[in-house]
Amino acid sequence: MDLTKARLQFITAVVLYGTIGTMTRFINLPSEVVVLVRGSFGALFVLLFQLSQGRRPDAQAINANLRWLVASGILLGLNWIFLFAAYAHTTVAIASLCNYMAPIIVIAISPLVFHEHIGPKRLACIVAAFVGIVLVSDLPGGISGGVDLTGAGLGLAGALAFVGIVICNKRIGEVDAFDKVIVQLGISAVTVLPYVLVRNGGIPIGGAGALSYVLLAVLVVVQTGLAYIFYFGSMGVLPVQEIALLGYLEPVVSVLGSALVLHEPLGVAGAIGAAMVIAAAALGETVQE
């Protein structure tokens, strides 16, 4: 794959990820059911793609890293539960941006977990991101009204789960990217299933309407299956720094979808906060000190 094709596929993947929050607004099913379907059928789609390429999962590599793969899959399921619940409590922009605090949290804990030094530039990024989240989540209004603060809290809980995924992935050895995705998506579905059964007394998939089922199929096939294939298929070609920077198209698309499609208010302070979070996260991954 040449660099131009890899770049196009990666951008397509992150843009597709960024539209998920907007699309879930039009799916008339409980958020945890959407997560369950996404994880289970997404894993099946990627597996079928891998088999169509004449490759089979490397059972030996998977077994050698099974503990961390399972842990990361559980955390992926929790990340989706928190994030999709956040979409239901607040705007897509607030939920997405709070979830995208994950890179900043990773940088903040890196001295303890990864024994990495935090220089003044990265420290400034951490402070800027924190201020940005306060502006985006409308903390004073959330305290009095409750709704935004709940959504922001769920988004941040999703970010913490994603931090756990990063830590697990750092400990996973040589495993094919698609093998990793299949296991993680499958485990995420297994993680979510008991929550779905307890919360709903079963799997409520009836009566949602034709539009919901069409959009759910798009979510599984396009925004999960194809997006994961494009994302991981291009990562081996693109430079690491370009991957980090292009990845922040995702929250930009989420914010634009929230404002332009859903007409959800963000306000001047929120727009400033959104810019601060995205810029701080992107710079935090690229500055050297």
Image (tube, helix red, strand yellow):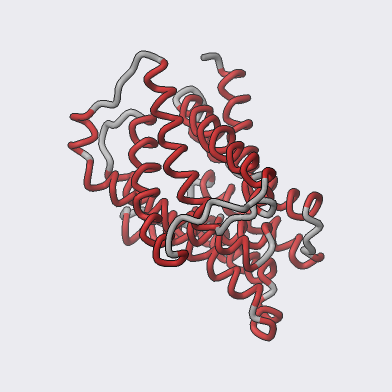
Using the image, determine if residue 137 lies above or below residue 159. Answer: below
Residue at the extreme front: 207
**Coordinates of residue 124 in the picture (x, y in percent):** 57, 61
Determine if residue 106 is in view: no
134 with respect to 38 (left or right): right
Using the image, determine if residue 174 lies above or below residue 126. Answer: above
**Coordinates of residue 71 in the picture (x, y in percent):** 29, 51
Determine if residue 68 is in view: yes
Label tally: 0
**Coordinates of residue 216 in the picture (x, y in percent):** 59, 43
58 with respect to 85 (left or right): left
49 with respect to 18 (left or right): left
Return the residue nearer the eye: 36 or 112: 36
Using the image, determine if residue 80 lies above or below residue 180. Answer: below
**Could you say which quadrant of the image residue 5 lies in?**
top right
**Coordinates of residue 248 in the picture (x, y in percent):** 61, 44
Going 44% across and 61% down the picture, which residue do you hit?
A: 160
Residue at the extreme bottom: 144
Going 28% across and 47% down the picture, which residue do you hit?
A: 70
Return the residue nearer the eye: 197 or 184: 197
252 with respect to 39 (left or right): right
Using the image, determine if residue 220 lies above or below residue 194. Answer: above
**Could you say which quadrant of the image residue 28 lies in?**
bottom right
Going 31% across and 57% down the picture, which residue do you hit?
A: 113
Going 77% across and 55% down the picture, which residue do you hit?
A: 262
